Image (cartoon, helix red, strand yellow):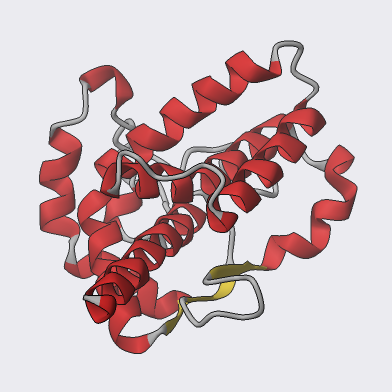
């Protein structure tokens, strides 16, 4: 029974971190690695390169802040999809929510709570449309424990056919728009088409 509980906990962490990593790739936030190897009080993490820039959020565009906010909320959204009664006071979720509120403060929204709920829904839609990729990356994490960005992309590409079916089930108004013919989308996996619009890149 105890081993089963540990296994469920590891899978929950893998799903959570996989969602962060995939959102990071789709919204152009590079990372060094994603891991489910615990460190101190942290049970898993994605080492985003942009973290070193967060001391100067005033220099970020609103689009960049909103995109990174989606990345932060993708983890909790995946946790809730996996377990509807996920505890928001769980250390992993609490840390993400704290970072999300820091970003919302930087966006200077008047009604922060309403905006937070709006962004939670956006993250939920992202997770719903990328669930097969999230599961594939989580499975790779459970096997390898730590993945570099290229390994995450490879797992996403392998899940692309199922991901396309998942996106087809997302309401039309919530689906990302297909890129224009011939338009460059960089090195993004096929599953990220639609996230690579001008303005989504962190340099814009």
Q: Residue at x 65, y 33 (%)?
A: 63
Q: Is residue 9 left or right of residue 110?
A: left
Q: Residue at x 51, y 20 (%)?
A: 118
Q: Residue furthest front?
A: 1
Which quadrant of the view contains residue 7? Answer: bottom left
Q: Position of residue 73 (x, y in %)?
A: 52, 42
Q: Position of residue 32 (x, y in %)?
A: 59, 77
Q: Residue at x 28, y 65 (%)?
A: 156
Residue 173 to residue 130: above or below: above
**What is the number of callouts on the image?**
0
Q: Quadrant of the C terminus?
A: top right
The answer to whether any part of residue 204 appears in the image is: no
Q: Is residue 169 left or right of residue 54?
A: left
Residue 38 to residue 187: above or below: below
Which quadrant of the view contains residue 140? Answer: bottom left
The foreground one among 89 and 174 is 89
Q: Quadrant of the N terminus?
A: bottom left
Q: Position of residue 126 (x, y in %)?
A: 36, 39
The answer to whether any part of residue 67 appears in the image is: yes
């Amino acid at each position: 029974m105890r081993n089963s509980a540990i296994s469920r906990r590891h899978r929950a962490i893998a799903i959570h971190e996989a969602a962060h990593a995939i959102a990071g790739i789709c919204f152009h936030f590079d990372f060094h690695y994603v891991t489910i190897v615990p460190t101190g009080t942290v049970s898993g993490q994605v080492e985003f390169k942009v973290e070193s820039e967060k001391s100067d959020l005033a220099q970020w565009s609103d689009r960049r802040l909103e995109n990174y906010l989606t990345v932060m909320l993708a983890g909790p959204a995946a946790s809730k999809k996996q377990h509807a009664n996920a505890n928001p006071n769980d250390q992993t979720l609490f840390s993400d929510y704290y970072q999300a509120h820091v970003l919302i403060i930087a966006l200077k929204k008047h009604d922060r709570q309403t905006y937070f709920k709006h962004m939670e829904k956006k993250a939920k839609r992202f997770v719903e449309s990328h669930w097969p990729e999230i599961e594939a990356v989580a499975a790779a994490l459970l096997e390898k424990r730590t993945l570099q960005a290229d390994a995450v992309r490879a797992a996403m590409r392998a899940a692309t056919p199922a991901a396309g079916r998942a996106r087809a089930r997302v309401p039309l108004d919530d689906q990302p728009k297909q890129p224009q013919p011939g338009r460059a989308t960089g090195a993004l996996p096929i599953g990220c088409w639609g996230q690579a619009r001008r303005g989504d890149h962190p340099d814009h």
